[in-house]
Image (cartoon, rainbow, N blue to C red):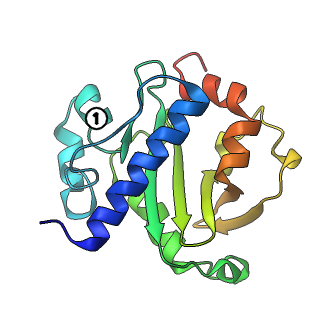
Amino acid sequence: MPSKAKTKGSGAERELCSLFSETFGGSWIRTPTSGAITGKSNSWRAKTMSKSQLLNSCNDVTPPDEYPLVALESKFYKEFEFHHLYRKDGNKTLNKWIDQVFESGIDMDKSFPMICMKFNRIGWFCCVWGNKLSNIDYNKLNYTKFVYNDNIYYVFDLIDFINTFAEELKIKFSENQ
């Protein structure tokens, strides 16, 4: 029987799939054993996998074929210390999640990674790499900008972000960039 934390995380991944299906269409599905195949100590496997194997194993959510570049990492936590985003060393939890995305084996140059974070009694947020936001007027929304390892990241309300920029994101998620 899975742990409560695993059940909670799997439920969040299914909810995330529904959010993305409603906004972008297509079948977004929870990746079986998400994160376990190429994550953390198994990151070496990514170097031996084909492109399709890698796409189907390094994300928490498997997108439909028309959006092969999107890479979603899903997190569901009780709480999050947003105020740490404004400290010099940043938010250690979010920093760790960013590191996990880099270790997952996805092609950071070609993909559009997003960390989608749900917090109890607060809702969904997303962390997006700043260099992925070209041609998106993200100033239409409230956001928090922060720097980690010399990269710029933005945190948005996830629902507002995907609803406001659905058309722009469809282009960025597809191979037609």
Front one among 12 and 157: 12
Count of number-bearing discs: 1
According to the picture, the residue beneath numbered tag 1 turns out to be 56
Quadrant in which the C terminus is drawn: top right
Q: Is residue 121 left or right of residue 52?
A: right
Which residue is drawn at the image coordinates 22% and 44% (left, top)? 32
Q: Name the outermost residue toward the left.
A: 1
Q: Measured from the top left, where is residue 173 in percent x and y?
A: 55, 28
Q: Quadrant of residue 134?
A: top right
Q: Quadrant of residue 10?
A: bottom left
Q: Measured from the top left, where is residue 47 in percent x and y?
A: 22, 42
Query: In the rendered image of this protein, does residue 158 appear above or below residue 54?
Result: below
Secondary structure of residue under mark 1: loop
Kind of residue at badge 1: Asn
Front one among 94 and 13: 13
Query: In the rendered image of this protein, does residue 25 appear above or below residue 156?
Result: above
Q: Quadrant of residue 79?
A: bottom right
